Each structure stands twice: as C-alpha cells, then as structure tokens.
Image (spheres, coloured by chain):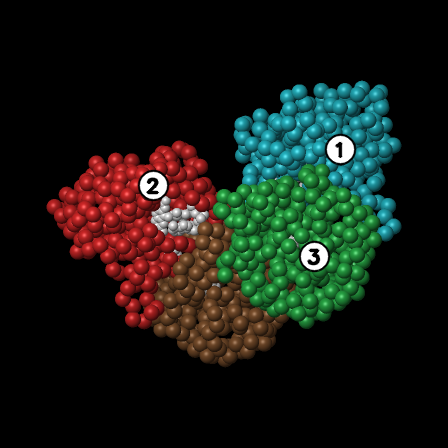
Chain colours: A red, B cyan, C brown, D green
Amino acid sequence: MIQKELMTVTNQTEIAHNIYEMTLQGTLVNQMNEPGQFVHLKAGDEMIPLLRRPISIARIEQEKQEFTMIYRAEGAGTNALAKKRTGDFVDVLGPLGHGFPVEEAQPGQTALLIGGGIGVPPLYELSRRLNANGVKTIHVLGFQNKEAAFYTEQFLSLGDTYVSTVDGSLGEQGFVTDVVNNHGLKADIFYSCGPTVMLKAVEQLHAAPHGYISLEERMGCGIGACFACVCHPKEDESGTAYLKVCSDGPVFSAGEVAL
Amino acid sequence: MIQKELMTVTNQTEIAHNIYEMTLQGTLVNQMNEPGQFVHLKAGDEMIPLLRRPISIARIEQEKQEFTMIYRAEGAGTNALAKKRTGDFVDVLGPLGHGFPVEEAQPGQTALLIGGGIGVPPLYELSRRLNANGVKTIHVLGFQNKEAAFYTEQFLSLGDTYVSTVDGSLGEQGFVTDVVNNHGLKADIFYSCGPTVMLKAVEQLHAAPHGYISLEERMGCGIGACFACVCHPKEDESGTAYLKVCSDGPVFSAGEVAL
Amino acid sequence: MNRLNIELPGLSLKNPVMPASGCFGFGREFSQLYDLSSLGAIMIKATTEEPRYGNATPRVAETPAGMLNAIGLQNPGLEKVIANELEWLKQFDVPIIANVAGSQTEDYVQVAKEISKVDNVHALELNISCPNVKTGGIAFGTIPETAKELTKRVKEVSDVPVYVKLSPNVTNIVEMAKAVEDGGADGITMINTLIGMRIDLKTARPVLSNRTGGLSGPAVKPVAVRMVYEVSQNTNLPIIGMGGISSVEDIIEFYFAGADAVAVGTANFVNPFICTELIEQLDQYLEAHNVDHISELKGRSWK
Amino acid sequence: MNRLNIELPGLSLKNPVMPASGCFGFGREFSQLYDLSSLGAIMIKATTEEPRYGNATPRVAETPAGMLNAIGLQNPGLEKVIANELEWLKQFDVPIIANVAGSQTEDYVQVAKEISKVDNVHALELNISCPNVKTGGIAFGTIPETAKELTKRVKEVSDVPVYVKLSPNVTNIVEMAKAVEDGGADGITMINTLIGMRIDLKTARPVLSNRTGGLSGPAVKPVAVRMVYEVSQNTNLPIIGMGGISSVEDIIEFYFAGADAVAVGTANFVNPFICTELIEQLDQYLEAHNVDHISELKGRSWK
Ligand SMILES: Cc1cc2nc3c(=O)[nH]c(=O)nc-3n(C[C@H](O)[C@H](O)[C@H](O)COP(=O)(O)OP(=O)(O)OC[C@H]3O[C@@H](n4cnc5c(N)ncnc54)[C@H](O)[C@@H]3O)c2cc1C
Ligand SMILES: Cc1cc2nc3c(=O)[nH]c(=O)nc-3n(C[C@H](O)[C@H](O)[C@H](O)COP(=O)(O)OP(=O)(O)OC[C@H]3O[C@@H](n4cnc5c(N)ncnc54)[C@H](O)[C@@H]3O)c2cc1C
Ligand SMILES: Cc1cc2nc3c(=O)[nH]c(=O)nc-3n(C[C@H](O)[C@H](O)[C@H](O)COP(=O)(O)O)c2cc1C
Ligand SMILES: Cc1cc2nc3c(=O)[nH]c(=O)nc-3n(C[C@H](O)[C@H](O)[C@H](O)COP(=O)(O)O)c2cc1C
Ligand code: FES
Ligand code: FES
C-alpha cells in the first residue's frame, strides 16, 4: 500500500562526488518488499521546487524500519535533499511502482546485474535478495569516472563485480556493454538499470536468455494518474497503447518497451 | 550609504507572543546614524517570499557593530526571519530612509514619544539618543494586550512610561491618545510611530507644538525607485505631488502628509 | 450542520472541492489512497472519441512555483472510458464531471452525446482550452463565436448540464464567458493552463518534446483569481474555479473572487491526499470563522 | 575580448543587460549603489505628457514567486522628465530607452516627439501594455490594428528608433508583433506584466487598491520565454526580452528562446545590485562555456 510519511533521516553521507547515501526511518518501510521500487519525495513543503522527485530504494532494512537511497545532487530537488541532516524529516510517498521480479531467478542460477551511474542503487537491494535466495550474482557497474563511483565494495561482497568508467579512471575503460562483451559474461537472467541508451545496448547483448530493465522518465504524480511518464510498448498495432513508467514500471521485461 | 550585507544573527529572542528581538552584526552598522531609519531584509535567497521586508532599527550599538530590531512574526517573510538562529545569516539592505530628527529637541526640553504595537521599536533608539542629549523623554506605549507588550522596562529606565492596552490586560485600558489626554501630558516636541489611524489621532492631540511621525506602507524596492510607497503631501495644489515613504520618509514632519 | 454542500446545475455536491481534469486520471490510483466518495465531484481526464496516445515525452517540466505539462489529451477513447472507467467509478457515491475534448465540432458532439448518457456522469466539462493539441482545442477556446457555436451544438445533444472550461490565454476572458453563456452553457470552469515554455540549458532545446506546455500551480493563481473575479461579475453562470489551489486560504480567495466551487489540479501531485485534507480543513476554517455556509463567501470581494 | 556588446537599432550596447521600465525609476536611487555606466542601457519609468500621481496605495502585493503592482504610471510628466531626470542622466555613459505612455494617440505622439529629441535618449519604448491604467494603454496593446496605427504615428515623429512593448494579455502574441512590425517598429520589448489579483483574507477585498495589478517575477518566466520563442521566429525585429529574469541562466534561456538583449525588472527589488552582478556573471558564463559572443546564443532553441 502506498503511504505518505514524514520520515526521519538517520544517515546522510556523501559517498562520492555529489553522490549521497541517505537512510530514512519510518513505518512506510513496512510496505516495501520489492527491490527496484522507488519513492517520490520532497525535501520540504516549499513551492520551489514544487514537484516530488523519484528516487530508487537501494536497501531495505525492515527490522530497523529503515531504507537507504543513493542519489546524485544535481538540481533544486536533490540539492535540497542533500542539505538534510540526521534527525531532519523528508516527505516520502511510496513505495511506488513494480520492482525487479526476484523469483524469476532460480536458486543455483546466475544473474547478471548491469547498472549505470545512478541506475546502480536499486541493483544493490536486488543483489542482496538474489543472494539470499541462493542465486549467484555477477555485477557490472559503469560510472562516468572514479569520482562518481560508489558501492563497488558492497557489490563485491555479494559476487563478482566488474567496474568500468568512461574515462578509465577506475576499473576498465569503456561502457558496461564492453565489459560484458570483453569478458564474455553469460547468465541465466539479467537485470539492468541505467540511462536509456545503456538499456538499449544491454537489450542487444544476449548475455542471458531474458531479463528485466528499469526505466527513467520525468514524472508528475508518480502513481499513474497524470500520464506524464508514458512509454510505448514494442508491440502496438493501434499506435495508442502505452505503459506508465511510474505504475506499470519502472521495471519492465526486456523487449516489452520500445526504447 | 546604503549597503547590502549578509549579516550574522547574534541574538534571537521571543520577547512577547510572536514578537521577536533580533540582533544582527556586520559592517553595515557603521552606516547607521539616525533613529527611525529602517532596513529592508530577506531571510533567505528563496523566491517565496520574493520581496524584502521593511523593519525599523530599534537599537544601534556601533562599538559592537550590532543593531537590534523587534518584529512581529505574521506572514511568510517575518516567519522565515523568526526561524533564524544565532550564527545564521540574514540578507540586509540598509540603512534606508530618513529617521527622526533628534536635534530638533533641545537639551533640557521634554519630548513625548508615542508608539503603537510594532511602531514602538524605533522609538527606543530615539529615546536613548534624546536622553544622551539631555532631553527628558515621556513614553506612551500602546499594545493590543498584555501578551503583545514588550520593552516597557527598557523604556521605563529612560523616562516616565505609560502603557495602555486595548483590552486593559496591561496598564491602562484604551488607546495611547486616551493616555495622553487623561494625564494631560505636555511636551516641547512629540515623536510617534504606529498604525496610520493612531498617527492621525496623535496629530490631533496638540500635546506639543510640533512633532514627527513615522509611516508604514507596502514596499517594493525600499529605496525610492518603484513608486510603491507614495503618499500625498497635505499641501498639493496640482494633485500630482507625492512623497515616498521609503526614501522621503518613513519619518515626516507632523502635518506634512495627508493621512 | 452542513456548511459545505452546494447545488449547481446537475450537481448535488457534498462539498465544493474536486480534483481537476487531467490531474486525477479516472480516479483509480487515488482510490488506493482514500475513499473517492469523500470528494465533492471528480473531473475525469479529457475524453476523445478515439483513443489518443498524446505527445512524446518529456511531458512535464518544473517552473518557479509551477509546472508545465504537455500530455496531449492521452486517453483510452470514448468507448473504453465508458465501459471501463465510468463503470468502475459507479462503486463510489460521487458525481462525475466528464471532460470532453476533440479536434472538431463533430468530435465534441459525438463524445458529449454518448458520455452524457452514462448514469454517474452528472455534468460535462467542455474542454475548449487545451493548449497541448495542434488542432481544435485552443481555437474553440479563443474565438468567442466559435466557442458559442460549439456550446450550442453540445447542449443540443447532452443529457446533462454543460460547463465550459475557459482558457486564460485570451485577451478578453469576459467576452469568452459571455459567448458560452449565450451558447447556453450551464456553468463555467476556469482556468485551464497558461501557455509557457522552458528551455534546457544543456541542450538549448525546449524541455518538453511538444516545445510549449500548459503552466499550472501556485504561480498562476493571481491570474486565475483575477479572471474569476471578472467573469463572476459579468455573467450569471456558476463558476468552478481553479488554478494554483493548494490550501484552504486559496479556496477562500477563489470564493471571495466569485467562485461557487473549486477544483484542485497540480497540488494532487505534490500531495496526493490534498483533496480530502482540504475538505476537512475547509469545514474547520468555516467553523473557526463563524461562517454558516460556504456559499456566503461567494463574491465578497466585489459585493 | 568583448563577448557582450550588442548593436541594436539606435543602441550600441556595452552589454545586453538593462533594468526594465518602472523598476529602476530614473536611476537616481541605483546610482548610489553602483556606477550606472556599467549598464547596457536604462529603460526609464513610463513618461506621460502631464504629471501623474497614479493609483492609490497599496500598490504592490506578493504572490508565489512573483509580485503584483498597480503603480499606475506615476511620473513627473514630460517636461520635468526632460529637464530634471534625463539631464541628470547625461553624466553617465549609458544609452537611455525612454518608455512612452499615454491615454490616447496624441499623448504618445506628443511625448515621443519631444523626448526623442533629447541627446541621451537613443530609443523609445512604446508602452502599449500597461495593465494598470483605466483608459488607453492596454487597448493599444491588445488590438493589432490599433497598435499598428499608433506605432506608425509615433514613428513619424520620433527622432530615434521605436521599440514597442508587448502585453502578454493577448490571445495571439505573434499577431500583435506582426502588427507593430507592419507599423514600422524597429524592435520589440516583451513582456509587460500579466493581469492578476490577490484578495486579502481578512478584509475579503482585493489587496491592491486598484484591485487588479500586473504580475511579474519568476512566476511569469515560462510565459515570457514562450512568447519570445514564438515572436522571434515570426518577425524580423530584434527583441529585448524580459519577464522573471533573476539569474544568468535565465538570461541564457531568453537568448535561446530568441532574444537579442534582456531587461531585468522585479529582481532589482530583491537585489538592487543584480544588474551589475548579472553583467559580470554573464561574461564569466560565456567564457566558461566557450561562447565567443553572446549573439551566437540567439534562437538556438529553434535554429
Ligand atoms: C524510477 C526512477 C528512479 C530513480 N532513481 C534514482 C536514484 O536512485 N538515484 C538518483 O540519483 N536518481 C534517480 N532517479 C533520477 C532522479 O529522479 C533525478 O535525478 C531527479 O529527479 C532530478 O531532480 P533534481 O532536483 O536534481 O533536478 P531538476 O533539474 O531540478 O529536476 C527538474 C524536474 O525534472 C525531473 N528530472 C530531472 N532529471 C530526471 C531524471 N533523470 N529522471 C526523472 N526525472 C528527472 C525532476 O524530477 C523534476 O521534476 C530516478 C528516476 C526515476 C524515474
Ligand atoms: C518603514 C517600516 C518600518 C517597519 N518596522 C517594523 C518593525 O520594526 N517591526 C515590525 O514588526 N514591523 C515593522 N514594519 C511592518 C513590517 O514591514 C510588516 O509587518 C512585514 O512586512 C509583514 O511581512 P510578513 O512577511 O509578515 O507578511 P506578509 O503578509 O507575508 O507580507 C506580504 C507583503 O505585504 C507587505 N506588508 C504586510 N504588512 C505590512 C505592513 N504593515 N507594512 C508594510 N508592508 C507590509 C510585506 O512587506 C510583503 O511585501 C515596518 C514597516 C515599514 C514600512
Ligand atoms: C498534467 C496535467 C494534465 C491536465 N489535463 C487536462 C485535461 O485533460 N483536461 C482539462 O480540461 N484540463 C487539464 N489540465 C488542466 C487542469 O485541469 C487545471 O485547469 C489547471 O492545471 C489549473 O489548475 P492547477 O493550477 O490547480 O493545476 C491538466 C493539468 C495538468 C497539470
Ligand atoms: C513596480 C513595477 C512598475 C512597472 N512600471 C512599468 C512602466 O512604467 N512601464 C512599463 O513599460 N513597464 C513597467 N513594468 C513592467 C516591467 O518593465 C517588466 O515588463 C515586467 O515587470 C516583467 O519583468 P520582470 O518579471 O523582470 O519584473 C513595471 C513593473 C513593476 C514590477
Ligand atoms: S508520473 Fe503521473 S502517470 Fe506516471
Ligand atoms: S518602496 Fe519603492 S519607491 Fe518606496
């Protein structure tokens, strides 16, 4: 069930250049069960910025009623968020959307997790769940450069982890798809989140028989009411079919959406 | 000279119900010399509230580079101001306008200072200066009720002080003009600041041969450029003459302005 | 005591607060958050004869105290709206105001005719003011004679009262209001969005793929209040006011300006619970201010 | 290297940033704060033939990310403006754009004729868009034929190029722009304020004593950008863009939309040093973004 709650900041750390890890506490966490879902949030009740901001859930800790997000401070909304300190409140609406289907990977199988930039965070909770289910995970994480990279250690503790940066300042130089190709990585299923161009390339990889991708789109409501975030399904004879990233997604079956 | 400075809050105290005393420190204080001048200020660089707020200077302490204001937290601007804590910054433009002419009262003479509500604050620095010049001051301070009253002790330490409240919960019940009439107060000069209706009544008192009043008006620029704060001079044959409260005032000679 | 119930043509409202068209879909999503029966009414998303996909994304952008949208009338089409959405809405005790859109007169007439027959549709809202479609829409909303003609045609076929939604993007809003009054409109809803644009500094291109979009939210409230103020004094039609409402104080301001009821759009995105919260707060406000009935506040600024 | 100098009809600007009319008086107050010679130009307060007192106070009110004003063209009248204000301004090395207003054609013609003869007046800005005067003003700004006729008449008598200031309160801004182009205008300045209103919750009366006022500030920026975008593609006239500018990013947005220069209004009240600060920051921005000259940015959103 979707809740709206003023949640309490229990941790706010800049873990890379302009990249923040924030932990929030509240009963809303009870509603969280799928990795890949997101929250829609607002740092304060100001009219500027007016709209909420969608941010993925990166880690869920039910026992502590806490969840963690990782976000890049870029514009007005995320910068306001970055100003929050432990003990402050954040207005959270969530959990929203449909996440990654963890159960699609059978125990003993291998899952390939491919993330780019701020698309990396939701893969963390996913990987934790997969590993808990006895699924072997391989992680391929792409960043702009060394300064923008984060959570490589955390992923490493869950499975093989390849890191690439566009400028080669950390890990291999190149894109995540180069890494998959160069190492001939194969798996039973893949899960991916990142910029659309990356997802498009990932869909063409054929490193696994099937997989799931998580999309980004500018949002209004975040709950499926405003039609701001639609995308075209790949199969659409009428030309008027649509999927909403916020409520049908953000996670879709690879090949479902026209990228 | 008018300066714009991010000044530091060195004191913020709620001295009555929703009435705050705030002290600010910075080099801008060097420019302050007239009691009755005001500052035009903004709590932050947000676009809401957009405009600055005019607040009178209530006390100047050159040695410490500090000045004090007393304001009522009412709307968006003053409420934002009330949220400031010691060490925070406030964006101050000032000093602005023309204040009370202290030198119009001769040493040994008596000055009657009549203030209503948030019109009381500028009279405090005025009284300090007058007393420093050897002028005897009588203070008549009017408030809505006991909860809204402030600085009565401070004024008492400078001279005779009469307090009235509309509901009689503190001092005498009634208006400041009632107090002046009831006690038959007389002086060589009067100075007054408060709501326009009060100033109008004060001008009719004839408790002193002449005097000065300080006006309020909604402001845009605060420096005389936008014509938001004009008032009519009493003598105006053309019908097009005007005075600007922000730059020609806020203090005017009694009888100069059509109230 | 009920301070909030309002009778308008076709509409017996429990209270005068309703979500604005396009900001509430067909209610399904919000029904997960609260009971839709608590609303005064629901203005459903614009319905066209045929299904429409609308514009390419990005479809929304943020502006100072406002937002731009260029959804482009996306909707599943008349048939599905009736069969799925309105049918589903019947479980709630709430009147529906059906927002009707089209590219030419025949489209409007066709949709109006069919949709006005549906049980829970108590009124139509003629959307002659959508800035985000290339043909029709806005033209109907900016030329008085055209607006009047369309209103007349729709009135002829509608089984329920017809409200016309005015565009603020006109030189003379009173002239438009009078035109639709002459055309037989039963009420006016106003305002739709102002046409605006934002340009992306990195790409130097408009942020919205439709380039321009409709500006809504607190930023436009002063324009909306002014227009309600003018129109309410110059027509005899009831007005459902909207544009930037996000607090009880805003609702009161619209009433003082001359509104008979209000709709809340953009604020639903900021706080999806806002409509129910406002209904509760409005009642409290009236009680605290000793107002026996909300209708007493109408037009106080000019009465 | 000079990245900021701009040549416009009648105007050799050191830089393209100038205070907007009515937000800078005649410069006296700001001259206490910084050297007026640093400005690209100065658009002085509207001047009418006779002195005007303007509207009663309150004349300003705050709105979300904006403000309303209803000054009502207060000014000391043509004679005094020339004798005192323009004379005083001669000490600065800065071109003056004289904002000309009136109630009827003859007023405009008279003021234009006289004021355009003054040495430091390098251009006129025909104010056909002031929403705060009862007669004239706004009518000239909303009827294309009337605007064209007025422009023609003023052009006949003016010794300097004539810019026409467009009102955003029209259905079709391009039509208005084309009309004044046909009338012989040398340039366009846009936008003036949107008509808005705020109502005081305590008194239930409009906050402004003039009731309605002109909305300006960040809230209106999306409307201004959209209009500059449309007009710049549909006329050949240079455009001085304004409406909500308060940062270098805003200036860039107006350039991308199609402006040739920009004016800053309301922001002068928020930060009286803003014009000089923006001029400096604009130069830095262009350097940081490897732009050789500001004019390269014009119309990038549609080129
Ligand atoms: C489902 C989903 C999950 C996301 N998860 C994360 C995450 O875990 N970490 C993270 O750092 N970012 C994430 N993003 C991207 C994040 O939403 C944007 O970076 C953020 O909204 C930008 O806001 P801003 O205030 O910094 O920028 P501004 O430029 O002020 O934003 C202006 C408007 O554009 C929208 N916008 C701008 N960029 C994006 C974008 N890339 N995607 C969607 N809307 C955008 C904003 O929401 C806002 O409405 C996610 C986006 C989506 C849709
Ligand atoms: C010269 C001068 C000196 C003043 N000195 C003091 C003082 O020492 N202490 C104090 O408490 N107040 C003083 N005031 C009044 C003070 O400026 C207002 O109370 C304050 O601006 C209200 O702002 P707000 O954010 O609380 O209200 P809002 O309702 O948010 O204000 C909205 C707009 O109206 C204007 N406004 C509202 N009330 C007034 C008012 N009474 N006078 C002028 N503008 C107003 C605001 O400046 C703002 O632009 C003074 C006013 C003037 C003109
Ligand atoms: C995302 C979005 C979609 C909208 N879609 C419609 C629509 O389909 N039909 C319509 O008449 N108005 C539509 N509107 C306009 C609103 O109903 C309302 O008139 C406008 O947004 C002003 O109110 P607000 O400021 O409260 O949002 C839409 C507005 C938004 C923000
Ligand atoms: C207080 C005030 C007074 C104004 N007076 C005039 C005027 O005399 N003549 C004119 O053409 N425009 C006048 N304007 C409009 C501005 O020049 C400008 O077009 C408008 O405010 C939009 O710009 P902004 O958002 O930067 O303020 C005035 C605006 C304000 C806020
Ligand atoms: S954001 Fe509103 S439908 Fe997806
Ligand atoms: S506030 Fe601008 S002239 Fe006084």
Q: Which residue is mark 2?
A: A145
Within 8 Å of ligand 4, the CB of disc 3?
Answer: no
Gap between marks 2 and 1, in whole Å?
A: 60 Å
Q: Disc 3 marks which amino acid?
A: Gly
Judging from the image, what secondary structure is the residue with disc 1 in? loop
Mark 3 against mark 1, which lies toward the viewer?
A: 3
Q: Give the residue number, with chain letter if any, for mark 3.
A: D10
Chain of the residue displaying label 2:
A
Which residue corresponds to mark 1? B99
Circles 3 and 1: CB atoms closer than 8 Å: no
Q: Establish whether ligand 2 lies closer than 8 Å to the Cβ of label 1.
A: no
Q: Residue furthest left?
A: A108
Residue nearest the viewer, comparing B243 with C37: B243
In this view of the protein, can residue C195 be seen by the observer? yes
* Quarter residue D194 falls in: bottom right
Are the two marked residues, 2 and 1, in contact with CB atoms closer than 8 angstroms? Answer: no
